[in-house]
Each structure stands twice: as C-alpha cells, then as structure tokens.
Amino acid sequence: MFARFKNLFIGCFSLFLIFCVLIGLRTNTFGNSKLHFGPAVWFRPIVYPNLEETQQPSMNLSKAEKGPNIKIAKGQKLFATGSQRLNDTKHKIVQDIRKKYYPKVQVTNVVGRLGNASLDGSVNCSKKKVKLSQTVLPITGLVSFPGSGNTWTRHLIQQMTGLGTSSVYCDGGLRARGFPYECHRDRAKTVVVKTHEGRHFNLFKKIVLLVRNPYDALLSYANFAKAGHTGHPSKQVLIQASTKMFEHSLKWYVNLTRNTIRKFKGPVHVVQYERLQSDMARELRKLATFFNLSVSDKDIDCTVKLQEGNFHRKTNEAKHIELLHTVYTKEKLLRLQEAARYSEKLLKDAYSVDIDLGGKTEKLLFQTS
C-alpha cells in the first residue's frame, strides 16, 4: 500500500515539475533577458518615382549596411494591447532565429550640438534617472532614417520628461548605456518608440518624424556601418561603404518620409535635426506639447545643459565638409540635393512645414565644389 502511494506521489510530482518547466519556458521565467530569439527581418525600400530612376545595383550588403536587424523575443508582443507580430512577406528573413545576436542601431554623427536656453549659472542640473510612465501613454513612434539623430533625440526627450524611451529593436549597448527600456515590451509606458521603418506604423497612435539633411544622414549611416557607434573608419573604407550603400540609402531616405505621409493617418510632428541643434529649447517645448506632457523651464534648461549623451562621434566642421567632398562625387551631391528638395516639398504639402533640408551643410558643399 505504501509503495503504491509512493509511486503515485512521485508520478504526480514529476508531472508538476514538467508543467512548471513548460510554463517557465513559455513566459521566459528561466531565460536570460539579454537573449532574444526570433526572426531577423530586413527593410526593403520602395523605388520612388520622382527622383532620377536608377536600377538598384546588385549588392552584397552586410547586416549593418543594409539596415536594422529586428529581433523579436520568443512570444514577445510588439504592441502593448495586441498580439501583432512581424509577418510581412515582402521582407526577407536572413538570420537563423536562434542566433544569439543583438542588432546594431545607428547613432548620429553630430557637429556642434548647441542649444539656446538661457541658463542660470545657479541652476543645479543632474542627469535624470528615467522611469516608466505611471499611466498609459499613446504609443508614439520616433521615426527617422538611420543617421538622423534618433538616439540623441531620445536622450533629450528622456532628460526633459524623466520618462524612458523604447524601440522596436533591442540593442544591448543602448540598454546598458542610458536607455534602460530599450527592449521593454510595454511600450505604452514609454514616451516614444524608435523605428527606422514604415512597416511599424500600425503600432503607433502618433508619430514624431525626425529629418536631417541627406548629405550628413547618409554619411553617418555609412560611417556607423563600418565603425559602430563612435568610431571613425579610414577614408578609403568610408568611400567604399558609401558607394556600395548609396542607391539603397537614398531611396530609403526619401521613401520613409513619403510613406509616413501616405500611410500614417494619425497626428505627426516633424522635427528637423538641425533646428533641434540651433534652437533646442523651442523645439523641446514643441515636443512636450505634442506629447501632452507638462515640463518646467528648469527641465528645458537642464536638458540643454546636459544635451550630450553617451554616444557622440566628435568631429569639426572643416574636416566634416572635406570628408563629404571625399565621399560624394559631384553627381551624387546633385542627387542628394534633388532628394532634399523633393522631401521638402512632400513635408510642405502634407504638413505645411517649411524645412530647409540642405541648410548650412549644403551651402558649404556647393560653395566649395
């Protein structure tokens, strides 16, 4: 009798353990939060008709060159209240779903970030420890072409609001260095969600569209593809990378703005990277209004004072213009200029915003060309 009871107990206990293990695997209780298994999907740009049509060359782009590597944790939901998963047949699955790899993200190449808030020397500013919102926020996309200053803008937003930002991607380096909610699943508790791709528009209620002049944006993207967040590749390597990536990047740059206008029907707030540099306080106040968040003058002033984040590739203006001339031929400069005019018209017609996407960089380039 005792033996039968013992065997029954052992059997039931074994089933209980198996059940617990299965539940743990399902909910990732026993998993390493740093490992995210799921399909890696590349962005594929759409040809835009209004610029000079050039057939996409046959390229063997590396992961960093071709675009963001989107990894979704097993069972992860991209939307806080739904269960949408990336399932677009137009996008090629290029990486084994169990490869332990974090996607890299673009960090901008910034020249002279300088705001204009009137700082009182007596103001004591310290970097905020960001947290999640206590209330549900409308999920707001921070949409940009890679190289347009997305990561730096996230830093400014976090410092201004004290709220964390997140991403449709999951970059371990960013999560460890200033963006603790980079991989957070409940994005309705973060103030903005980073993406470089129009295919995520269905996740958002609102969008902040961040734009930058194409000369610097494409250069920054090529620079990142070869040297990471803050490095500097040799000129020869940068020229080769830029040449290889140019057609792909130029189409992506224009299509992202065009697709935002055509496909997203919710509120859109356009932020120009160069204006954020030159008139930071004013642009931050506009952002706070768009987020419907209350921020104080001290919040704005301290954000300007503490504007430098952990990812900053330093250079100077003269060397920067020289580098642009080294990387781009005259023909490419003209095509970038055409892309800037086309994008300006799109933004003007759709949102009634006047933006000079050439700016100082374009003037310097064509004065000395």
Image: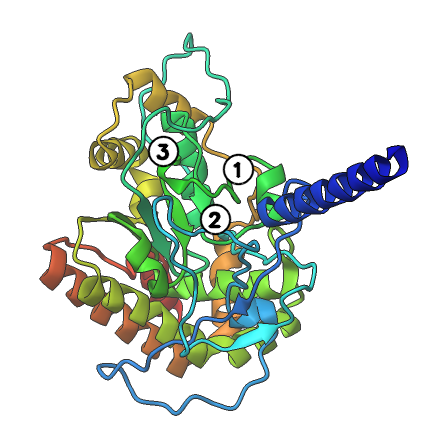
The foreground one among 3 and 260 is 3
Identify the residue at horizontal 33%, vertical 49% (top origin).
Answer: 141
- Quarter of the picture containing the C terminus is bottom left
Q: Which residue corresponds to the image point at 67% horizontal and 66% vertical from the top-left?
A: 234
Question: Residue 174 appears at what percent x and percent y?
Answer: 57, 44
Q: Earlier in the sequence, mark 1 or mark 2?
A: 2
Q: Looking at the rendered structure, which numbered label has been put on residue 110? A: 2
Q: Is residue 283 left or right of residue 225?
A: left
**Would you say residue 329 is visible in this rendering?**
no
Query: Is mark 1 in CB contact (under 8 Å) with mark 2?
Result: no
What's the CA distance linking mark 1 and mark 2? Answer: 19 Å
- Mark count: 3
Which residue in the structure is indicated by mark 1?
179
Residue at left offset 19%, top offset 63%: 261
Q: Earlier in the sequence, mark 2 or mark 3?
A: 2
Residue 328 in percent (x, y) is at 47, 75
Image position of 233 with respect to 9: above or below: below
Amino acid type, label 2: Val
Q: Amino acid at mark 1?
A: Phe
> Mark 3 = which residue?
115
**Residue sitting nearer the eye, 33 or 289:** 33
Horizontal and vertical percent position of residue 315:
55, 50
Q: Say which of marks 3 and 1 sits in front.
A: 1
Instruction: Answer with the quarter of the image where residue 120 lies.
Output: top left
